[in-house]
């Protein structure tokens, strides 16, 4: 099989902090180095892209020495944590910004879908916007005209074709945008998480179309997503990006497993209450923890809240949380109103029953509001923990599929 | 682009490596941008494209009253209304092209940040959109001109009329060229946006729009050529000369303008081409 994309020693440097007055001196230094034919004086001091370290330099490598090859007809999933450099890689691949070092060689046209409906104008009709959006994505007028009916059919907006899209619901706009994109015919397609929008019906339509594109047309697709289920079902191969470098390139299944494994290394079943994000002028978290810290699937576990109230006017708090799986699916949400105790605290404990959640990594999104449901603090993915399993009373040893794992009654007849 | 053509994205790019072929492939996008600009102006307005002529008419009217009437600045015997309208029409084209191009990265950040297309399409579409607007205003000027001409006012066109298309081309080149030079700086130094917005207005007063060039000539005497350091001056002066037969046609000055326009266009293109590939990091 022949290669279609070759990425060699690709690096991208960004400046940290604000682009402001200091930048003029740096610009002049750079310019001076350039006319003397020297290399960029700031490229040596730049850091690797590790957000946990406090910056010691003004420059950072968002991508560092990225190398990979994509074969023709491959569907490559690009996975990595937030801030690992996935979006930067996409931007460089889509020619939105240029690399600091290295090259990308491609055979054929690249079209990128970082957003659906880019450049659509609200005052123009759906018909006019199909042409405008198509042209922005690189189609010619002729190409669009030949596919116009398919696009309209796919979008399901036939009735409103001559209505300005400012009258459209946001869902309809997304449909229209995706419909145009779905009929692009480049040799290489770069797709960001566009599937994360729209209603369920549309999502399944979009995933179906993506599968269609990747399986039947022999097109090369690069797909970036946080949804591991989607990566597994759409992609054949994958790469894992960490701190701006390629950690691994393998089959999509292996890459997803590796990603999930990596993700569990840095779990925080208990919050660090010193972190200022857990305090504001109204409340302060004293405790937010999962107990036991590594729950076993065959025992109950608790989520404990203890919150100090800074505001004496608060009679209590609405405490709510969403439990999110490592594949970013919200398993369930729960909450209650808890009154303040005499010491000025709100304390509550929620027990999650045994034999309910499957093994794996979970996160909590926390929402605290006052009596009248005005939001006081929302925290996303603050607590993370893993449910494990130490013994199993039947023969199969692999991972049991699914988000929940109830213990059901089986009868042998 | 053919099916298996090899494309290379690299950190290095030569100064003059402008992909004209690619720009040509995206020509449909240019016409659609022009259409978008046009539609967004007149959609849901009662008067529609008439707004393109209402603006110059009102401006000319005010100039006629203030500068012609109250300040009493002469117009070389040319009907005041016609004199100001000619200047405003030409200047309007230049300043719109210049201002819009100089802000092209800032106003299109959203779009440029999400999808790639040859960025030159954006300034080119500005020039074409404004050419349409200019054409409408020019027709207004011609109508007014015919009225004065047929009622026997003292205006006489001459052979310079054949040069008018060239004059318009030079105006466009100067507008887009200067705009592209500035656009590379506005991405980083936002102060410039404020500076140029009123700077353009100030430059208008150094251009013979509200006064005839002969006025400067009388004041500066033999140093009148100093006024040509404003390269738009010879163009507007030639335009007026073509229609009115008064004023000056200075071929040396016009040559200077032409060279200036071409140089600024080349420099602007090179700078624009350089900035477009990384402006997203600084805007």
Image (cartoon, coloured by chain):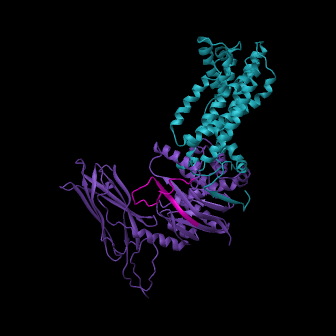
Chain colours: A purple, B cyan
User: Residue extending furthest front?
Assistant: A36
Relative to residue B132, is residue A62 drawn left or right? left
Query: Which residue is located at x 65 percent, y 27 percent?
Result: B229
Residue A178 lies, with reference to residue B93, above or below; the image says below
Task: Choose between A386 and B240: the one closer to the eye.
Answer: B240
Q: Which picture quadrant has residue B58?
A: top right
Relative to residue A287, is residue B265 drawn left or right? right
Residue A76 location (% of width, % of height): 58, 67
Query: Which residue is located at x 63 percent, y 65 percent?
Result: A6
**Magenta-tinted stretch:** A38-67
Question: Quadrant of the image for the N terminus of chain A?
Answer: bottom right
Question: Quadrant of the image for the C terminus of chain A?
Answer: bottom left
Q: Which picture quadrant has residue B126?
A: top right
Query: Which residue is located at x 66 percent, y 43 percent?
Result: B269
Residue B162 location (% of width, % of height): 80, 27
Whether A40 is among the magenta residues is yes
């Amino acid at each position: 099989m022949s290669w279609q994309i070759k990425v060699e020693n690709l690096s991208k440097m960004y400046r940290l902090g604000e682009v402001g007055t200091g930048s003029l001196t740096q610009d002049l230094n750079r310019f001076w180095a350039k006319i003397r034919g020297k290399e960029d004086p700031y490229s040596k001091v730049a850091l690797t892209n590790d957000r946990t370290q406090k910056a010691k330099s003004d420059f950072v490598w968002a991508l560092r020495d990225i190398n990979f090859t994509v074969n023709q007809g491959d569907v490559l999933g690009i996975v990595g944590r937030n801030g690992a450099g996935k979006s930067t890689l996409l931007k460089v691949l889509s020619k939105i910004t240029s690399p600091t070092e290295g090259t990308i060689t491609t055979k054929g046209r690249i079209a990128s879908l970082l957003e659906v409906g880019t450049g659509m104008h609200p005052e123009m009709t759906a018909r006019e916007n199909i042409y405008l959006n198509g042209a922005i994505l690189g189609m010619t007028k002729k190409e669009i005209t030949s596919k116009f009916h398919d696009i309209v059919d796919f979008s399901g907006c036939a009735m409103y074709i001559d209505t300005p899209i400012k009258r459209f619901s946001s869902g309809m706009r997304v449909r229209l945008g995706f419909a145009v994109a779905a009929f692009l015919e480049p040799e290489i397609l770069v797709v960001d998480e566009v599937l994360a929008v729209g209603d369920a019906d549309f999502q399944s339509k979009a995933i179906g179309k993506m599968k269609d594109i990747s399986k039947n047309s022999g097109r090369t697709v690069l797909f970036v997503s946080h949804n591991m289920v989607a990566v597994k079902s759409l992609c054949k191969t994958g790469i894992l990006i960490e701190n701006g470098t390629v950690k691994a390139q393998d089959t999509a299944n292996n890459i997803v497993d590796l990603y999930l494994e990596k993700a569990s290394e840095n779990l925080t079943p208990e919050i660090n209450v010193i972190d200022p994000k857990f305090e504001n002028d109204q409340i302060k978290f004293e405790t937010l923890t999962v107990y036991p810290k590594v729950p076993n699937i065959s025992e109950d576990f608790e989520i404990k809240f203890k919150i100090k109230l800074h505001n004496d006017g608060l009679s209590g708090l609405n405490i709510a949380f969403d439990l999110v799986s490592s594949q970013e699916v919200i398993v369930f949400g729960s909450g209650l109103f808890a009154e303040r105790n005499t010491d000025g605290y709100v304390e509550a404990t929620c027990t999650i029953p045994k034999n309910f959640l499957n093994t794996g990594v979970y996160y909590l999104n926390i929402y605290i509001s006052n009596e009248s449901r005005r939001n006081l603090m929302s925290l996303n993915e603050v607590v993370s923990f893993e449910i494990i399993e130490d013994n199993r009373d039947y023969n199969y040893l692999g991972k049991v599929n699914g988000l929940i794992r109830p213990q059901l009654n089986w009868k042998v007849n | 682009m053919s099916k298996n053509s090899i494309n290379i994205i690299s950190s290095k790019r030569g100064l003059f490596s402008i992909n004209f072929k690619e720009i040509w492939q995206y020509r449909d996008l240019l016409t659609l941008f022009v259409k978008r600009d046009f539609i967004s102006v007149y959609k849901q307005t009662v008067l529609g494209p008439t707004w393109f002529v209402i603006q110059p008419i009102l401006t000319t009217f005010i100039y006629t009253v203030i500068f012609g009437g109250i300040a009493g600045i002469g117009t070389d015997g040319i009907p005041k209304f016609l004199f100001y309208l000619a200047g405003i029409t030409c200047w309007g084209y230049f300043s719109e092209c210049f201002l819009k191009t100089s802000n092209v990265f800032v106003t299109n950040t959203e779009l440029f940040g999400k999808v790639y297309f040859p960025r030159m399409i954006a300034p080119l579409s500005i020039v074409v959109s404004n050419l349409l607007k200019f054409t409408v205003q020019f027709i207004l000027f011609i109508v007014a001109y015919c009225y004065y001409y047929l009622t026997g006012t003292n205006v006489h066109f001459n052979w310079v009329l054949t040069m008018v298309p060239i004059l318009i081309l030079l105006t466009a080149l100067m507008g887009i060229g200067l705009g592209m030079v500035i656009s590379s700086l506005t991405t980083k130094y936002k102060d410039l946006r404020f500076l140029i917005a009123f700077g353009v207005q100030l430059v208008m007063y150094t251009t013979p729009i509200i006064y005839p060039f002969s006025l400067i000539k009388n004041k500066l005497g033999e140093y009148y050529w100093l006024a040509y350091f404003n390269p738009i001056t010879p163009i507007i002066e030639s335009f007026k000369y073509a229609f009115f037969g008064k004023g000056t046609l200075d071929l040396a000055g016009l040559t200077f303008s032409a060279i200036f326009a071409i140089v600024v266009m080349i420099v602007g293109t090179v700078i624009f081409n350089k900035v477009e590939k990384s402006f997203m990091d600084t805007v």
